[in-house]
Image: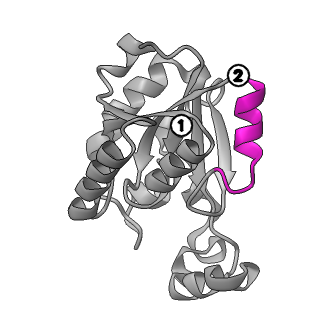
Amino acid sequence: MTFKNWIHLCIDMQRMFAEDTPWHVPWMKEVLSQVEEVARWRPDRTVFTRFVPPKRASDMPGMWHDYYRKWDMMTLDRLGPSMVDLVPSLKVLVPPARIFDKMTYSPWTTGELDRVLRAEGIDAVAISGGETDVCVLAAAMGAIDLGYHVILLKDGVCSGADQTHDASLELLGDRFSVQLEILSTEAFPARA
């Protein structure tokens, strides 16, 4: 099966995860070249998400308020807005690649990304980025719930925790095999 109406949804490949912060994901540098390859191949079909923290913990409702009280050093007032940027090698692809900002793990929460993709006739989403067991998992589950065919690019996703990264790949591959398939970044272009 080939994918005709697809986008590459690259999750949170940002400076605040790539650089020396409390949220640093060491594996990000290991998958960056594979993510770059897919994004450079078709930047016009790439959407980069950015996880955007609030300025202050008090700006967020409910448990997000408590979360950012714990991670106060990762609020925009303390972190600085430039750390929300994509890593430089991906940022240069915008445009034609696009950026979609989100304040939660899932890019689907507001409904805006789904509206944009539906208007473009998109029915398949190839996912890369980080973290496999948090934002990538939320993106994959949301896309499944919305009826998209999901392609998880296994060598293009990363996490700060090896055990839950592996468990997430196993869970998604086993439990959602009708709605999601796992491919390498090398195999994906031949199917697109």
Q: Nearer the viewer, residue 139 or 23?
A: 139
Q: Amino acid at mark 2?
A: Gly
Q: How is the image coloured?
A: one colour
CB under 8 Å between discs 2 and 1: no
Callout 1 environment at 10 Å: few (<14), some (14 to 19), or many (20+)?
many
Based on the picture, tell me whether residue 117 belongs to the magenta stretch: yes
Residue 27 visible within the image: no
Which labelled disc corresponds to residue 9? Answer: 1
Callout 2 environment at 10 Å: few (<14), some (14 to 19), or many (20+)?
few
Q: Position of residue 106 (x, y in %)?
A: 58, 56
Q: Amino acid at mark 1?
A: Leu
Above or below: residue 24 compared with residue 186: below
Q: Position of residue 43 (x, y in %)?
A: 55, 23
Q: Is residue 191 left or right of residue 6?
A: left
Q: Residue at x 55, y 13 (%)?
A: 4
Element type at mark 1: strand
Query: In the figure, residue 60 lies in which quadrant?
Result: bottom right
Residue designated by label 2? 121
Q: Where does the magenta region start and end?
A: 108-120
Above or below: residue 90 compared with residue 38: below
Q: Is residue 61 left or right of residue 26?
A: right
Q: Nearer the viewer, residue 73 or 108?
A: 108
